[in-house]
Amino acid sequence: MAFDPLQTAGLVLGFFGMVGTLATALLPQWRVSAFVGSNIIVFERVWEGLWMNCIRQVKVRLQCKFYNSLLALPPDLEAARALMCVAVALCLIALLIGICGMRKIQCTGANERIKAYLLGTSGVLFILTGIFVLIPVSWTANTIIRDFYNPAIHIGQKRELGAALFLGWASTAVLFIGGGLLCGFCCCNRKKQKHRYPAAGHPAPHTDKGQQNWTVLSKTTTSYV
């Protein structure tokens, strides 16, 4: 198979995208405390994630606490949790399907067409995973920026973009590239199969050797006469 590096690169990028998606969902640095003003003495640093809050005070180790109530959470936080869980599940399924479509994996037989379709399906799922990651990350970033420039919100309640958001954007880009490579491999393999086997409506030209010999014999007989 001439496109083995393409599928290998796609699956490797999909794996790194899955790791980044999982880390984005678990890290608490979605919202971090903002230090606004010129004369501010920083006594504590606050991190807010999807599952917990963390506070780090001066000369005190980091303390984290999970959210007590699921129903008391804001609707945007609940939606972000759900989308990230779906993204992690989709990414894992896409990786397993892509592994089954590899050339040296014999669980689906030796049919190259089936393997190409499996890799194409894996690529589409990776792209869907990137969309599911992009929505909550971008929504949260938009909310943080809007509240930061809102004068009605107290300075102590303003937040800045955390490292988890940047990791989410990077994971989205990696998932898009990996999914695009796998989809491109599927399209290239389909074109290769079409060139290898001609369509049924256009059969290859066939010449009858007996008819050609009879034509030559009749021409020579006519010349003698």
Image (cartoon, helix red, strand yellow):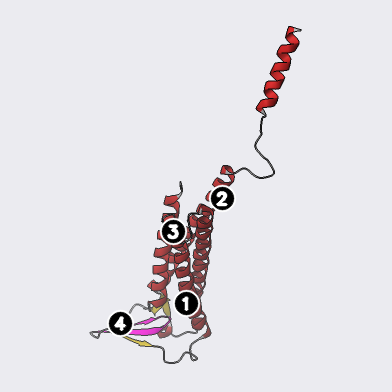
Q: Which three-letter amino acid code belongs to the residue tagged 3?
A: Gln
Q: CA distance from mark 3 to mark 1?
A: 31 Å
Q: CA distance from mark 1 to mark 2?
A: 33 Å
Q: CA distance from mark 2 to mark 4?
A: 60 Å
Q: Which mark sits nearer the N-terminus, 3 or 4?
A: 4
Q: Residues within 10 Å of mark 1 (few under 14, many from 20)?
A: some
| Residue 167 in sight | no
Total of numbered circles in the picture?
A: 4
Give the mark toward the camera: 3 or 4.
Answer: 3
Q: Which mark sits nearer the N-terminus, 2 or 4?
A: 4
The image's mark for residue 190 is 2
In the image, taking residue 143 as reference, residue 63 lies left or right, namely left
Q: Is residue 60 above or below residue 84?
A: below
- Residue nearest the observer in this picture, 22 or 57: 22
Give the mark toward the camera: 1 or 2.
Answer: 2
Q: Which mark sits nearer the N-terminus, 3 or 2?
A: 3
Tell me where the magenta segment starts and ends, as one range.
46-58
Q: Which residue is mark 4?
A: 42
Q: Is residue 115 above or below residue 88?
A: above
